[in-house]
Amino acid sequence: MVLQQALADLNAAYSNFFASVTGRRKGPKVAPPRFRSRKDRRQTIRFTANARFQVLPSGKLRLPKIGDVAVRWSRALPSAPSSVTVIKDAAGRYFASFVVETEPGALPQTEPVIGIDLGLTHFAVLSDGRKIDSPRFLRRAERKLKRAQRALSRKQKGSRNRDKARVKVARAHARVTDARRDFHHQLSTALIRENQAVAVEDLAVNGLARTRLAKSVHDAGWSAFAQMLEYKARLYGREFYRIGRFEPTSQVCSACGAGDGPKPLHIRAWQCRRCGTWLDRDVNAAVNVAKAAGLAVSACGAQVRPGAIPAQCGEAGTLPGAA
């Protein structure tokens, strides 16, 4: 049954590829199927309804030719599953992913809208002035990762001790990945629940990943966070916007719209030459992100304050000879 399912998946992949080449399939082009990489430690097996897998009343999962498997459920299934995929990751952990049918539950309408400026010092700066610190999960676990990687490099290739050391390295990386994913999920869910519309900037992550900031950029995980915002907005009936990466969000005053040109990264606050407003660089960029998406936002609570404006002649002051 498992080999039959693998052949069926291969047949579907080739059908989608040829349909895409000939133009019968709409959407982006589909690449031909490829062999799995030898370096890929992730293994999967899928059982459809024809394989007759079962979720037992005791909470165990009955798989054909394997038997009853104990499962630690993360949530209750909303409906009867049509298929299950068993996944073994590089850390030796097993996961069961079910395909079920469920209706999207739209959240009640709300008024606030938000713009988000993603960064490294602060993971996200919101247009209402809030700043979310960057957890830097990889940086904090770097010492343990180095120690585990060093122990792996000292083991003889092909030995059982090397395989044990490899699993330790994989588990250390898995803890970092899980912590980052959990942080992204909690923050994205909170933003979607609190706001009717969310706007983010389409950052050139691939380009930034080739600079000296590559490790910090990968540690932040901006792309995964933006994807979570997008699918959760679609799931819960919210609005999601991506603005172009060439939008000068940090060069334009959010109060009057005057352009002030590019600024070095060490300048975190600046004063608009036209209206005299003092602007926090990141909050100003978040407000401009929301405005570029067509959202009406205010910098309530943000570090944006009007500067001193001299009075016009004849508008205030004491005239000579006045009684």
Image (cartoon, rainbow, N blue to C red):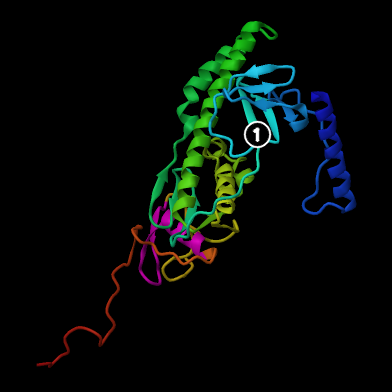
What residue sits right under mark 1 in the picture?
Answer: 98
Residue 265 visible? The answer is no
x, y percentage for residue 275? Answer: 38, 71
Q: Residue at x 38, y 55 (%)?
A: 129
x, y percentage for residue 247? Answer: 56, 61
Specify whether 36 is left or right of 195: right
Would you place residue 297 above or below residue 44 in this image?
below
Foreground: 274 or 111? 111
Q: Quadrant of residue 135?
A: top left
Does the magenta portion include 288? yes
Q: Residues within 10 Å of mark 1 (few under 14, many from 20)?
A: some
x, y percentage for residue 242? Answer: 58, 56
Q: Residue at x 56, y 26 (%)?
A: 174
* Quarter in which the C terminus is drawn: bottom left
Would you place residue 311 above or below residue 80 in this image?
below
Stretch of the chain drawn in magenta: 267-291
